[in-house]
Amino acid sequence: MDFRGIVRSLSISQLIKLFGIAITKFTFFFCFMKATKDCIRITTEHFGNDHHKNNVGNAFRHALWNMLITLYSIEAGKSIERSIDWAKYITDWHEDAFKNSPLERAMDLHNNQVGRNWFIYLHEEGKPLKSRDTIVSYLLNNVDKAIHITSLEEIKSMPNRLVFIDK
């Protein structure tokens, strides 16, 4: 789905909220838009269009999205704490705006959190996070450890592992 398609799918109240976010948090919002574009392109390169299903490609995409939002926000001069908070805020908003089943929503929120956790881990370990290539390589090296889940309870037992529903 392209940007116009996404905007058309939002309600008036969601559009107003998004417009307010864009105006009041312009730099962060710009980073979000750039990260979203890059994330879709990179994920499609590695997983084709299958990443729009609830599979391992989708798990990769959600983690990458959060990591890129954080990276680009830091590059724009924001602190790591504010950048992580922003990534959580905007991706939580996205999950609220676009309704999924409870299991799909929990999976997406979980994989978003894993991406932010991994970003913090790499940052604290002193790993060079100066490019998205570093992040993509790290995710590709860890995506094969993603766990297939069938219930909400299973997600809770996988705090730092990507999860997916569809094989």
Image: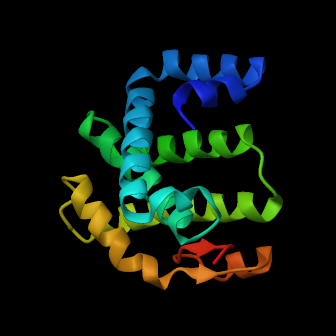
Can residue 84 be seen here? The reply is yes
Percent position of residue 105, x then y: 73, 57
Picture quadrant of residue 148: bottom right
Picture quadrant of residue 10: top right
Quarter of the image that includes the C terminus? bottom right
Q: Residue sitting at 76 percent across and 17 percent down?
A: 12
Percent position of residue 163, x then y: 60, 74
Percent position of residue 141, x then y: 33, 78
- Return the residue nearer the eye: 54 or 98: 54
Q: Residue sitting at 53 percent across and 29 percent down?
A: 3
Tag count: 0
Q: Residue sitting at 56 percent across and 23 percent down?
A: 21
- Return the residue nearer the eye: 135 or 158: 135
- 113 versus 3 height, above or below: below
- 53 versus 142 height, above or below: above
- 50 versus 19 height, above or below: below
Colour pattern of the rendering: rainbow
- Relative to residue 113, is residue 27 drawn left or right? left
- Relative to residue 94, is residue 152 drawn left or right? right
Q: Residue sitting at 43 percent across and 33 percent down?
A: 33
Percent position of residue 116, x then y: 46, 59
Quarter of the image that includes the N terminus? top right
Can residue 113 be seen here? The reply is no
Picture quadrant of residue 31: top left
